[in-house]
Structures are given as structure tokens and as C-alpha cells.
Image (cartoon, rainbow, N blue to C red):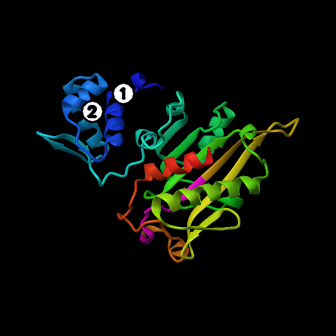
Amino acid sequence: MDKQKMTSKDRVLDLLEKNRTEYISGEAIAASLGISRNAIWKAINELRKQGYVIEASSKKGYLLGNSNDIISQQGILSYLNTDEEDITEKIHVFDVIDSTNKVAKEMAISGAGHGTLVVARSQNIGRGRKNHSFYSPEGGIYMSIILSPKRLSSLEPDAITLHTGTAVCRAIEKACHVSPVIKPINDLFVNGRKICGILTESGSEFDSGLVQWIVVGIGINFDSDIAEFPHELQEIVGTIFPKGKALITKNQLIADIYKNII
């Protein structure tokens, strides 16, 4: 989907995300996007209803507030810095779904290609290895990426999981200044507490046994409130940041992880 097919609300959000540190006047937004000042005002109001904090000044214009950390397609795109024409169509963001891996697998079966990304703000039925449940409240990052076997150096499940874990570690270290440790083979720990789980799944042709697609699912406790976790998990899990004290946005970390894996 190109910029012309995006709604005015999405285009305004995209511009605000790319200019987080400075105010943008209504006149500048109108000139940049080719829409009316009234359309901008409606878009700002729609975004505010969705929970975005947008500061407004009669002299300066509009600014996306620093307190915003809402996962969105536009927010992720603003950190990818890519000229790939179909990248927008590859990114799918949901408020809440059963499982990002479940949706990604359904998309893969329907023909979605390498690099398709599914992200949810929370999951109802998050799942880890051996069908263990993965508690997935708001405050976390839940993402799944479709990978083409042709783009991978190995089709060994453990190798793919390790590659994913290493990519996540690099992204967290660079962006968050936190150094996770991989514990075989699909969990990441910080200070002895689990902050991330990885689930790798695939689909094969029945007759030939050839792998058709791979989905890697990543669940991260970003700045979740541990006090809200089930009691039996509170002594086991941790978060990258304390609640409300993140140094970066979830959108940035999602984009950094995505770039490392793809």
C-alpha cells in the first residue's frame, strides 16, 4: 500500500512519528501531505480518541507527546527507513488476537511472503514451546515473522531459533542498553529473570516433506507490570524496563528486531 492509499489519519500519524522531537505546523502538514487543515484537525482528533497524546500550540503546531508508546504500523515504519515498495503491506498490527504465530501461519498458508510481520498489543492465547502458555498482557511486545526457507542458511529448527534469539539480543543491547543472556535455546534472561520467549514453527508439503514457510514468534516483557502477572510467574519473569520508564518506544525495538532478522 503506497502513501496515497493511506488514510489522512495514518498519513498524519506517519509524519508525526518521523518528527517526534519537533513541532510541525498545520500549514507544513497540509503542504507535505496535500490535505486540508480541516482534514488534519479531524485526523488529530481521531488519533487522540485512539489514545495518542498530541500536543498542540497555536504558534508551533503539533507534536506527538513523549508519553506515547502505542504500537502502530506507522510507528514501526518510521524506524525502518526502507525504500521497499511493499513494506507497508507486510506489516500487520492488531490490538488483541489469540496468537501472532497463529495469524502468521494462516497468512503463510495463504501465500504471504518472506518478511511478513504480525504484531499484537496483547494476546489471548499466547503460546510457547511444548504448547506451554505465554502470558501476554499489554506492556509487552508480541510479534511473529514469516521467513522463506530460500532466504535462510539453515533449516534446522534450533539454528533458526538461535539466530532469532541472537537478533533479539543485539537489538535490545543496542537500543535499550540491556544485555540479555540466551538460555537454551529459546528464552532470554536479564538478571536471572525471563524477559523473552521464542517459538519457531514451520509448514511442509505432505508428499515431498519440503519446508514451505517458517514462522518465528517473539514475546517480550517490555515494560509490563509484573504485579499483574499470575502469582506463580512473578518470581520468574522480568522486564526490560520498569513500568512507565522505557527509554525507547516499542515501535523502535520491533523495527530493530525485524531488521536484524530479515
User: Label 2 vs label 1: CA separation?
Assistant: 9 Å
**Does residue 46 show up?**
yes
- Determine the residue positioned at 60% across, 66% down: 188
- Determine the residue positioned at 43% across, 56% down: 138
**Does residue 99 show up?**
no
Residue 105 falls left or right of residue 157: left
Q: Which residues are magenta?
A: 218-227
- Determine the residue positioned at 47% across, 58% down: 175
Choose top left, top right, bottom left or bottom right for residue 246.
Answer: bottom left
- Residue 168 at x, y percent in the picture: 58, 57
Looking at the picture, tell me which residue is in the foreground, 154 or 100: 154
Residue 79 falls left or right of residue 184: left
Residue 40 falls left or right of residue 254: left
Choose top left, top right, bottom left or bottom right for residue 184.
Answer: bottom right
Q: Is residue 16 above or below residue 39?
A: below
Q: Is residue 32 above or below residue 207?
A: above
Circle 2 — which element? Answer: helix
Circle 1 — which element? Answer: loop
Which residue is tagged 1?
7
Q: Are marks 2 and 1 in contact (CB under 8 Å)?
A: yes
Looking at the picture, tell me which residue is in the foreground, 202 or 171: 171
- Determine the residue positioned at 45% across, 50% down: 252
- Name the amino acid type tagged 1: Thr
